[in-house]
Amino acid sequence: MAATVAAHASSIQGVPPESSSGMTYRTNPKTGEKVSLLGFGMMRLPMEDGRFDQETVNEFVDYALAHGVNYFDSSPVYCQGLSEKATGDALRRHPRESYFVATKLSNFNKDNRTREGSIKMYRDSFENLGVGYIDYYLLHSVGGGSGLEEFEDRYINNGMLDFLMEERDAGRIRNLGFSYHGDISVFDYLLAHHDKYHWDFVQIQLNYLDWKYAKLVNKRNTAAEYLYGELSKRGIPAVIMEPLLGGRLANVPESIAARMKQRDPDRSIASWAFRFAGSQPDVLTVLSGMTRMEHIEDNLSSLAPLQPLTKDDLDFLQEIAAKMMEFDTIPCTDCKYCMPCPYGIDIPAIFRHYNKCIADDNVPASSRDVNYHKARRAFLIGYDRSVPKLRQADHCIGCGRCARHCPQRIEIPKELRRIDKYIERLKQELI
């Protein structure tokens, strides 16, 4: 990979022009349009009591556009089904030609994967977004569930893929692609039939940890190096999701953070991950689910403009990835596909707290640990502050509904039971 990136370093800097904002752009080979290397993922917008503050969403979108971001990615299921409407309300205040909007056919449930239900979801997206055409439309999360069988049920047997290709021919979809999770046979099948489907882009999970270690993190995942390579050799642009693994690569263990800061004191920990993804020459845009203004500002400092990583930087990140694999974190990306839990459990918040405590060395394994009492207090108090008591792991009944929707194939009930058991032993000082 390092050689590939080095060989394309000049094209990374030379092909996309710099805007007045400094943003780096990549060229869509089909349309010739310039797409911002930083894309705004509208799945982690701030919500309170199940509602958006539309003024905040507008502020985020306005700031992003003013600083060169022009790619906005949504879905009918993001943010409890409210993301498309909030995204559309913010974007329609700007000239249509100033942005690209992406959304998905998220027909996960049996009632909306019929032809009628899927077409309704598709048409509702136009209304919610307030657009006459969709720039980038995706088959959402192919490879999930039962793999190829589920893909055929969602997109082939009901004729939806043929329908979407016709919509592309009619111009209502300008670029057609898919987002991939899970079963590699589905990814390989869709690329093997590229001559039939003519994929305009594909969205994959790519970061410096998943580059080589995806399967070790989760046995159903595939190394991002392979996914990217298969797209690159076919000339299919890659859209990148989870460059930070749901924030895990912005909150690395303290010992690793110290090494990264020592190497580059002026950059954030997160910037390493964004520059890694952006340094791949066939990446069209890198999506970030930004929930605070400081997230937008920091990501802009990484990609507006991009300073491509050197071979030494890439080697350094693979050393960091190897060290990261020594920590027993849960591979949750905070996508919230598991939510809502019918019993009110805040699954992502529980996993976030557990992973943060691992990163901060606050998961004591024994009462003989030097920092046992400090770590115990930090874990238990932090847990109660992060997760309301009625939404904690002890309320899980093991129904398994959440696990069926997890793109990372986490055995969620099993992990919740493990965490709850650990917490009870920690409370009773049995550890």
Image (cartoon, grey):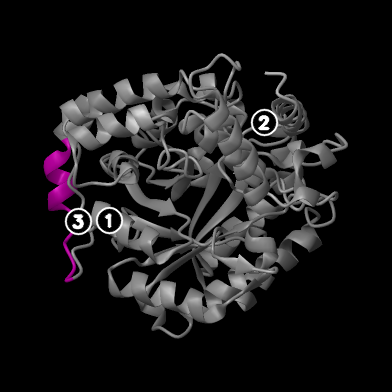
* Figure check: 191 above or below 82: above
Q: From the viewer's side, name the closer residue of 287 and 163.
A: 287
Q: Amino acid at mark 3?
A: Pro
- Distance Cα–Cα, label 1 vs label 3: 15 Å
The residue under the point 69% across, 62% down is 80
Kindly state the secondary structure of the residue where label 3 is placed: loop
- Magenta stretch? 8-20
Report the residue at 43% width, 77% height from top.
59
Q: Mark 1 or 3, which is nearer the eye?
A: 3
Magenta stretch encompasses residue 363? no
The image's mark for residue 370 is none
Image-quadrant location for residue 66: bottom left
Q: Sequence-wise, which precedes: disc 1 or disc 3?
A: 1
The disc, 2 or 1, on the residue closer to the chain's N-terminal end is: 1
Query: Which quarter of the image is occupied by the N terminus?
Result: top left
In the picture of the structure, the residue carrying the numbered disc 1 is 27
Q: Position of residue 380 (x, y in %)?
A: 65, 38
Q: Which mark is residue 305?
A: 3
* Kind of residue at disc 1: Thr
Q: Are marks 2 and 1 in contact (CB under 8 Å)?
A: no
Of the two numbered discs 2 and 1 in the rendering, the one whose residue sits closer to the viewer: 2
Foreground: 24 or 425? 425
**Which residue bears the numbered disc 2?**
410
> Mark 2 packing: few (<14 Cα in 10 Å), some, or many (20+)?
some
Residue 121: x and y in percent read 71, 65
Does residue 203 appear in the picture of this structure?
Answer: yes
As rendered, which of 194 and 419 lies closer to the eye? 419
Q: Is residue 229 left or right of residue 135?
A: left
Label 1 packing within 10 angstroms: few (<14), some (14-19), many (20+): many
Asked if residue 131 can be seen in this view, the reply is no
